[in-house]
Image (spheres, rainbow, N blue to C red):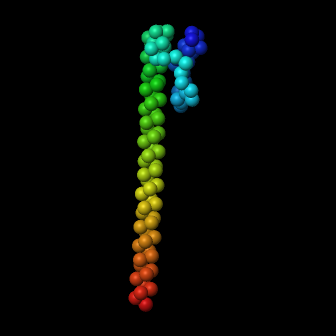
Amino acid sequence: MGRRLLLLLLPQPRRRLRRPRRPLPYSDAELAQAVPAAAFEAYVRARMELVREEAEREGEERQRAELARLQALDEAREREREEGERERERVSE
């Protein structure tokens, strides 16, 4: 666990965080016991930021989906209105 883990926990230049594709090899409790308190606090802060970013992304995706749904609904209502107008014109002729 030693040096490699500490390198992962050291402050890194700002970059987009990603959740690991596989489970971490160590539990949080094991990390807390094995690394300095400051390193573990940095690790926890980074994980909290990751969770916040994921929540924001998911929220944005839901907003985009809702916007697309509303736009489709608006377009369908507009088509119905236009068809109704054409039908009224045809009947009044």
Q: Nearer the viewer, residue 9 or 23?
A: 23
The one nearer the camera, 16 or 22, is 22
Q: In the picture shown, does residue 7 fall above or below 62?
A: above
Q: Identify the residue at image location x=43%, y=53%.
A: 67
Screen quadrant of the C terminus? bottom left
> In which image quadrant can residue 32 be found?
top left
- Residue at 56% over, 15% down: 5
Above or below residue 89? Residue 42 is above
Question: How far across and down, in percent of the image, does residue 23 sit?
Answer: 54, 24
Depth check: give the residue in front, 11 or 24.
Answer: 24
Residue at (55% x, 18% y) in the render: 25
Q: Quadrant of the N terminus?
A: top right
**Where in the figure is residue 80, as x and y percent of width and height?**
43, 71
Identify the residue at image location x=43%, y=16%. Answer: 41
Left-right relation of 33 to 4: left
The residue most toward the right is: 4
Residue 57 percent coordinates (x, y): 47, 39
